[in-house]
Amino acid sequence: MRHLIIGSGPAGVVAAETLRKADPVADITLLCGEPEPPYSRMAIPYLLKGDIAEAGTHLRKDADHYATQRIQVVHGRARSVDTTGRTVDLGGGQRLPYDRLLIATGSRPSRESIPGIDLPGVRSCWTLEDARAILALAQAKPGIRIVQMGAGFVGCIIMEGLLSRGVDLTILVRSGYMVRRMMNPTASGLLQQWCQAKGVKIFTRTQPAGLSAADGVLQVALADGRVLPADIYLSAVGVDPNLDFLAGSGINLGQGIVVDEHLQSSVPGVYAAGDVAESRDCLTGKRQLNAIQPNAVEQGRIAALNMAGRPTAFKGSFVFNVLTTLGLVSSSFGEWEGQPGGDSAEVLDAARYRYLNLQFQGDRLIGANSVGFTDHVGALRGLIEGRVRLGRWKQRLMEDPTQIMQVYVAGVHSVA
């Protein structure tokens, strides 16, 4: 059996290792789209900060790990997939055959459509190559000016690394508040105040009209007429799944690759995992992309078992995010925006940057936002993902949301 995995992020690596355990004699090929050992993008902020060296970003620290596992690592990019002939075209006449295929190609930074976006000095912070370029300029020119467009999840986790290098950081936020896909306005407001107190300049409801260059310096022209000079313009406006190479493959695509409960696509023998897999949410049943690393790892494992002939159902993805921004921990779980007709409760201590918002449907907790409540993360996830009926404990939480841990420990699963 020939197993081919396109993508060498956490989903792909875990899938390859799971396949080796499940199928000791199979041929396993891992296609890596960058000229690097398989690495974690989530480690890049720690590289920027100087907490780890480049080797610390590698998903497996032993240089012989893949050879020992008899996993062939091939560096190259998939250009197209022939699902009839069961081959993947890498260009230049090179094709990789397969019997079972896993697509785990992850995401790429969204591209802004503004004049000047191709100028030198415009970067994302998504790859090791990006990190090297940013670090080289920061070391060569202390106090460099970075104008960053976007304050989503990725934009927020890289702030600490950038500031630790002494950069002058300005953040532009197109919407009215930061991390709007995981936070309500109250939580976002606390995060903004925290970042500004740490020296970050933040302009909300602001976006560039275009970029130009003068004497080696970028000029970021804002829609209101202001112009910000920058040594680096950092575009962090979101990510999109890597799907372009699947055109003409016959694989059913929605927002991502539409998969069934076994993570198999519409084409038998072709599976998907991670950022590209459009699977069902375990709470709502809705199909969606869930681009978080824990989900990718679990999907990689489940897909590999099915590829190896061990039928295993994926229970569905669970939407949650835990974000650390300049030392402040925030989180969101499930349907944090709530449902029509549902109840909600919140507690706010702005002076201490602490906030907790709970969303209910009937006597179940269905979603939550939190800032500064690090001890409650596991309890929030357990109650929401477990669809626990709170019974009489719901009123306790309505009166005091901070009792979440006490309710969890009390074992409310036994309450009718």
Image: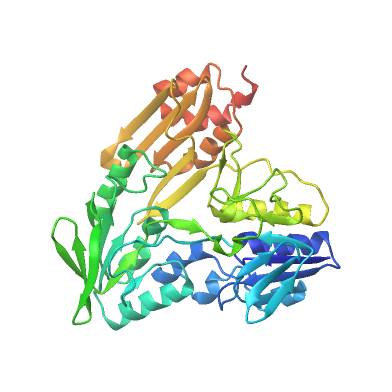
Q: Quadrant of residue 384?
A: top right
The quadrant the C terminus occupies is top right
From the top left corner, tell me how far across and down residue 237 is, in percent. Answer: 37, 57
- Quarter of the image containing the N terminus? bottom right
Q: How many callouts does the rendering have?
A: 0
Q: Write the residue at 43% across / 65% down.
A: 45
Q: Is residue 339 above or below residue 271?
A: above
Residue visible at 29% across and 72% down in the picture? 232
The structure residue drawn at horizontal position 60% and vertical position 34%, both measured from the top left corner, is: 285
At 72% from the left and 73% from the top, the residue drawn is 96
User: Which one is in front, 40 or 130?
Assistant: 130
As drawn, the residue found furthest toward the left would be 225
Q: Is residue 333 above or below residue 253?
A: above
Which is nearer the eye, 18 or 372?
A: 18
Is residue 201 positioned above or below 2 on the image? above
- Residue lying furthest front: 248
Q: Position of residue 393 (x, y in %)?
A: 52, 20
Color encoding of the figure: rainbow
Q: Is residue 226 visible?
A: yes
Image quarter of residue 31:
bottom right
Observer able to see residue 72: no
Question: Whole-percent x and y of residue 138?
Answer: 31, 77
Residue 258 x %, y %: 63, 48
